Image (cartoon, rainbow, N blue to C red):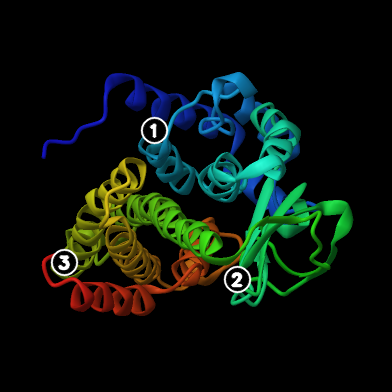
Amino acid sequence: MHFAFDEQQLEFRAQLRAFAEKECTPAAIRGAWTSPVGWSRPRWVALAEMGVVGLTVPEEHGGMGLGLVDLVLLLEEAGRSGLPEPLVETAALGVPVLLDAPGKQGEALRARWLAPVADGGAAIAVGMSSMPAVPGAEGADLLLLERDGDLHAVPAAAVTITPRPVLVGSRRVAQVGWEPSPATLVVSGFEAAGVLAGIEDRAAMGVGAVLVGVADRLIAMAAHYAQERKQFGKAIGSFQAVKHHLADALVRVEFARPVVYRAAWSLSEGDPEARLHASMAKAMASEAATVAARTALQVHGAIGYTWEHDLHLWMKRAWALAASWGDAAAHRARVLELLLAHPSA
């Protein structure tokens, strides 16, 4: 199989990078850390005007009607740029659930929420009962929440939010208090199991894409510092040990990237091995970002620990996202389980 992004997809990524270089500077990211929800509503609206937020929303609801393959490059760029807005939760997780929601409840949810998402007027958070807290709950307008194997759609006005301590100020998590009811039920029983599995797989792919971008930025920061920092009269980047550390981190990122792309394609095409590919993507991306963070910190030395240096904005994001929706060990275990269950996969 030959796979490559087309010119339109690459141009969209370039447009998002140009936008982020102006609107999501390190100073802007620091501002998000102290904002009420950890991200910027005006920037969310601006992203929606570009078509980023509503990329997976059908055209009849004001979106672009595109898929995960189109989205994956933008999620990677969001990681690289440090964009704190909830693109994974909204575009990769929330919108597909709303599109698949059955019956009259599904029709009502689509009519109520898809257009506001597309124009930047709404954001979505997704939480499972197995998760200790829900990412993005504080800024969400709609929460898709699992309880006892059923999936519910709960407006923000019907929940109570208890913020939890976080490592990354631009990635808030919170415990959510709410009561399930027939009015909130989206899907239940056997049908819900498939929907919930799909959420987990898209989350693994989406967070994996962001992690690849974060890792790429960390390596770039480390390489730049290694060229500028001198020791014994030479740039530390000329030292063999530093070169090896950076090369190892870069190799891990370059190996993880196509696996993430494959997962996006598999999920878009309904590949029966999509779950396997999603877990492979998250495992490799988590490891790549963790190694990139460690390497960047080693290259920077003591200055890398300081709050004043921008390194921690991406380094802490790598650590947080590497554990989100299952860490590398959990996804490696799932890969083994899937392969043993289907040896021909």
Q: Say which residue label 3 marks.
A: 244
Between 32 and 110, which is closer to the camera in this rendering? 110
Q: Rate crowding at label 3 as few (under 14), some (14 to 19) or many (20 or more) other CA atoms within 10 Å.
A: few
Mark 3 is on which residue type? His
Q: Which mark lies nearer to you, 3 or 1?
A: 1
**Category of crowding for the residue at label 2, using alpha-carbon neighbours closer than 10 angstroms: few (below 14), some (14–19), many (at least 20):** some
Which amino acid does the dot numbered 2 rest on? Answer: Gly
- How many labels, in total? 3
Nearest to N terminus: mark 3 or mark 1: 1
Q: Which residue is mark 1?
A: 70
> Real-space Cα distance between discs 3 and 1?
34 Å
Do the numbered discs 2 and 3 sit on residues whose CB atoms are within 8 Å? no
Residue 136 image-quadrant placement = bottom right
Residue 135 tag number: none
Q: Is residue 148 left or right of residue 17?
A: right
Q: Label 1 amino acid?
A: Asp
In this view, the residue in front, 334 or 210, is: 334
Q: Is residue 233 visible?
A: no
